[in-house]
Amino acid sequence: MLGGCGSAVFAANFGGDGNPLGIGFLGVSLAFGLTVLTGAYAFGHISGGHFNPAVSVGLAMGGRFSKAELVPYIIAQVLGGIVGAAIIYMIASGSSSFAIDASAAGAFATNGYGAFSPGGYSMASAFIAEVVLTAIFLIIIMGATHKNNVAGFAPIAIGLGLTLIHLISIPITNTSVNPARSTAVAAFVGGTPLSQLWLFWVAPILGGAIGGGLYRWLGSEK
C-alpha cells in the first residue's frame, strides 16, 4: 500500500500533466514491483511474504500453503492494507490541494471498470485482465520459489513480474491483482469504486487459483 498506492497518490502526477517530476505509469509500476521485491526479502522468512489474498489462495491451490491458514492470512492482509491506506490518507490530507474526486477513474489509486477504468475498458475486459494476469503472477511466484530453482533470487523475479503486470494493466483497471489493495483504497473513496469491488475480489482470487492449480497440474511440484 505505502509503496505502490502511495506512489500513485503522491508522485504519479506530481506538478500536473507533463511535469517531468511526476513518475507516471512507469514509476508507479516500478514502485509496486520494488515494494514486493523488498518486502519479500524483509518478511519472506517470517510469513512467506504473501501480502495478497489471491497469492495465498493460489499457493494453497498449488500445494505450497496450508488451506487452514487462509482465513487468518486474508484478514491480516486486508487489515494491513486498510492501515496503509489510512496512513496515505492522513499524509495526503496535509496538502491544501488534496481532495478525493469519487467520480474520477483511479481516484485515490482505486480500481475500476467502465467509466472508472483509466482507459474506459469494459467490465469484461477488466475481468479477463485481472484473471489472466493474476494467474501469470502465481506461475511466476511458484516457478521462482521452486525448490530446484536458484535460491535467493525469487523476490527479484516476483518483483519484476509485478512491475510488468502493472505496465500492462494500469490503463485497464488501475491494476489490482490483489483484493486487499483494492479493498483498502475503495473503503476511503466509497461510491462506485466500492460497488465495483466485487470484481477485484472474484477475478484475482479466480486467477490465483487457476495459476496455482495449473502450475501444480503441470507436474512442476514433483
Image: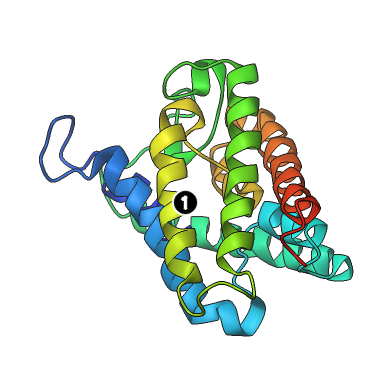
Badge 1 is on which residue? 162
Q: Is residue 66 left or right of residue 131?
A: right
Q: Can you say whether 160 is above or below 98 in the image?
A: below
Of all residues, the one furthest to the right in this rendering is 68
Q: Is residue 201 left or right of residue 19?
A: right
- Which residue appears at 83% of the width and 63% of the height? 71
What residue type is disc 1 on? Leu
Disc 1 packing (10 Å; few <14; some 14–19; many ≥20):
many
Q: Position of residue 159 (x, y in %)?
A: 44, 60
Q: Is residue 41 left or right of residue 19?
A: right
Q: Position of residue 147 (x, y in %)?
A: 64, 75
Q: Can you say whether 68 is above or below 4 in the image?
A: below
Q: Can you say whether 152 is above or below 208 in the image?
A: below
Q: Position of residue 161 (x, y in %)?
A: 46, 52
Q: Secondary structure at mark 1?
A: helix
Quadrant location, the C terminus: bottom right
